[in-house]
Amino acid sequence: MPIGEHDGLIIVDVQNDFCPGGALAVPTGAQVAETLTGVAAHFAAHGAHVFATQDWHPAEHASFRAQRGPWPEHCVQDTPGAQFHPAFALPEGALIVRKGTDPTKDAYSGFVDSDLEERLRASGVTRVFVGGLATDYCVLNTVVDAVDRDFETYVLVDAVGAVDVEPGDGQRALHLMAGSGAGLVEASAILAEDGASGE
């Protein structure tokens, strides 16, 4: 599956609050951060476009328990928890897309309360690959919305991590994404294939 200029890598919310030690930690968050650093560099080197979403909530966001939402306070604008994980590095030219800035919108999807779709279209992207955190929430919703917007969509199954509020939520999310029309692929296979072909 060669990667090229009409491909987009969407990296979802690889932020401190979603990694070990954070307010809504995914156990494998640091590993996902490291994996996606390599994947992003590979995509950029092959002429693809790299986008990273960033939860960027106001202090009184509707999703927080203090506002009767379901989640502890997380990814508050300009706090350490909202910053990208230190093991995660973006290649030059990557675009950061902030979401969840509207205090009334939950914005699980990278396409909600953001300009992600416009940026993808402007870049000529027709096929997207999605990785990041968390499989069962923001990755799931981003993937479903990408399919709904007629992007050819793939989930990088070895570059996502689940919260698993209920055991098995991550696996159920993968089934839901596949059922929505997304393909399930391994980033390691894409990297190996492109490397073997000399591209």
Image (cartoon, rainbow, N blue to C red):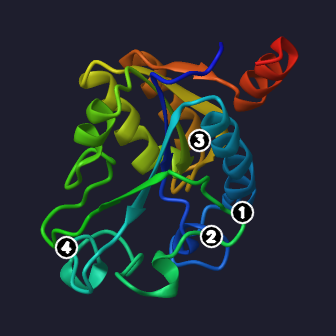
- Secondary structure of residue under mark 3: loop
Q: Are marks 1 and 2 in contact (CB under 8 Å)?
A: yes
Q: Mark 4 sits on what residue?
A: 62
Residue in the picture at 50% in, 51% down: 94
Of circles 2 and 4, the one toward us is 2
Residue 72 vs residue 114, the one in the foreground: 114
Cβ atoms at labels 4 and 3 below 8 Å apart: no
Relative horizontal placement of residue 22, taking residue 152 as reference (left or right): right
- Label 4 near label 1: C-beta < 8 Å? no
Q: Secondary structure at mark 1?
A: helix
User: Does label 2 or label 4 sit earlier along the sequence?
Assistant: 4
Q: Alpha carbon of mark 1 to alpha carbon of mark 2: how far?
A: 7 Å
Q: Residue 190, position in %: x, y?
A: 72, 23
Inter-mark Cα distance, 4 to 3: 27 Å
How far apart are labels 1 and 3 at the CA level?
20 Å
Q: Of residues 118 and 144, which is closer to you in this image? A: 118
Task: In this rendered view, identify the residue nearer to me: 51 or 45.
Answer: 45
Element type at marker 4?
loop
Marks 1/4: CA–CA distance: 27 Å
> At label 1, which amino acid type do we have?
Ala
